[in-house]
Image: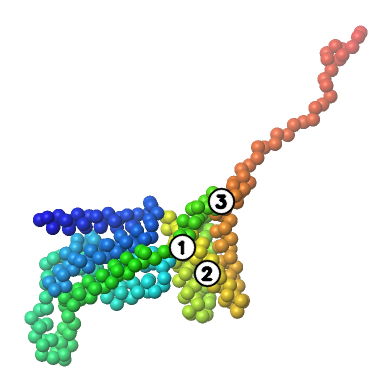
């Protein structure tokens, strides 16, 4: 009874941490996020008993695994490429998302029935591969202990990688931006204008004939666009990302100017927009110009002084 209460409190705590991760109301430290995700994934691995074919985790926790994976890949973009690639390969090779999504949909009774091979499966696979292929029974049951063992190993590997990634020091572009907010405040930047310019670059990039270069530019633009659309964009990473992309396109333009001239000009316009609209002095100047001055009231020049009635009448 005590262990069951401990498990429930542990899952409630993990559930609150997941809510915190997906909350758009606070700026979370990237290292803290990776540690929280690592604890969640490590807990899933601990609750898998591959020998008994049991996954003792509440479905609501399993259902969030796919979205947590997307969050992990997003957070690892600023980490060394080898770290992100390793996590992607583990998720793909072990089919972790598909396996856990399937388990979350099953009742405990369904898990037990799917985990055990049928008598027909046992007989056919024992007497030759031909009959196994004939009846479509050459594969193991979906929740066989070997499948769950691979899932458990994959989860543990991802959890260990995230523990390491949380210790890697990163350049905090957004922290530096906060320190300069009295002169440069990214929250003043108009997101609609930046997104419109990104759309223009995406249209221009679609005409690039070199598939590899086009894919690299489109991928980077998609990542930057997703960041801009967030309720709380990380402007430091956006600005750094566009400077990197600008340098890449500038190098291409030096070789084939006709192909990349328009893209170069548009990205230059994005950087100019990020610079000007984030400038506190620029925004203050634009605000002053937008305030209309008090209307000037036209007055007539003073006319000749009216004569007094005595002067008008004169002497008789």
Q: Nearer the viewer, residue 39 or 123?
A: 39
Is label 2 in a helix, a strand or a loop?
helix
In contact (CB < 8 Å): disc 2 and disc 1? no
Relative to 249, is 168 on the left or the right? left
* Residue at image point 36% right, 64% down: 167
Provide residue 256's location: percent of width, then percent of height. Answer: 60, 79
What residue sits right under mark 3 in the picture? 183
Quadrant location, the C terminus: top right
Whole-number angstrom distance, CA of label 2 to CA of label 1: 18 Å
Of marks 3 and 2, the one in the foreground:
3
Q: Nearer the viewer, residue 304 or 70?
A: 70
Local crowd size for mark 3, using a 10 Å CA cut-off: few (<14), some (14–19), many (≥20): some
Relative to 118, is 216 on the left or the right? right
Local crowd size for mark 2, using a 10 Å CA cut-off: few (<14), some (14–19), many (≥20): some
Provide residue 277's location: percent of width, then percent of height. Answer: 56, 54
Q: Is residue 186 above or below residue 116?
A: above
What residue sits right under mark 1 in the picture? 171
Q: Is residue 204 above or below residue 20?
A: below
Whole-number angstrom distance, CA of label 3 to CA of label 1: 21 Å
Asked which quadrant contains residue 8, the reply is bottom left
* Residue at image point 16% right, 76% down: 144
Of labels 3 and 2, earlier in sequence is 3
Provide residue 294's location: percent of width, then percent of height. Answer: 65, 37
Which colour assignment does the render follow?
A: rainbow
Which labelled disc corresponds to residue 245?
A: 2
Is label 1 in a helix, a strand or a loop?
loop
In contact (CB < 8 Å): disc 3 and disc 1? no
């Amino acid at each position: 009874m005590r262990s069951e209460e401990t498990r429930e409190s542990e899952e409630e705590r993990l559930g609150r941490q997941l809510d915190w991760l997906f909350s758009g109301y606070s700026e979370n430290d990237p290292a803290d996020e990776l540690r929280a995700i690592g604890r969640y994934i490590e807990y899933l691995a601990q609750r898998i008993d591959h020998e008994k074919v049991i996954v003792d985790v509440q479905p609501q926790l399993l259902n969030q695994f796919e979205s947590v994976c997307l969050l992990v890949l997003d957070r690892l973009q600023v980490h060394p490429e080898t770290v992100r690639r390793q996590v992607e390969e583990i998720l793909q090779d072990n089919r972790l998302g598909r396996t856990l999504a399937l388990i979350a949909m099953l009742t405990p009774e369904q898990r037990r029935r799917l985990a055990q091979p049928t008598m027909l499966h046992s007989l056919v696979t024992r007497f030759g591969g031909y009959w196994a292929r004939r009846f479509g029974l050459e594969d193991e049951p979906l929740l066989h202990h070997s499948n769950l063992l691979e899932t458990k190993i994959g989860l543990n590997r991802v959890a260990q990688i995230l523990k390491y990634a949380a210790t890697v020091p990163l350049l905090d572009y957004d922290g530096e931006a906060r320190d300069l907010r009295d002169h440069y405040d990214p929250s003043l930047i108009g997101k609609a204008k930046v997104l419109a310019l990104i759309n223009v670059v995406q249209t221009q990039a679609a005409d690039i004939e070199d598939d590899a270069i086009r894919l690299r530019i489109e991928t980077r633009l998609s990542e930057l666009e997703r960041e801009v659309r967030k309720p709380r964009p990380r402007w430091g990473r956006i600005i750094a990302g566009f400077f990197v992309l600008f340098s890449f396109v500038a190098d291409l333009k030096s070789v084939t100017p006709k192909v990349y001239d328009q893209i170069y000009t548009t990205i230059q316009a994005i950087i100019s927009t990020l610079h000007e609209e984030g400038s506190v002095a620029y925004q203050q100047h634009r605000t002053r110009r937008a305030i209309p001055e008090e209307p000037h009231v036209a007055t007539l020049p003073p006319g000749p002084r009216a004569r007094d009635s005595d002067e008008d009448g004169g002497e008789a």
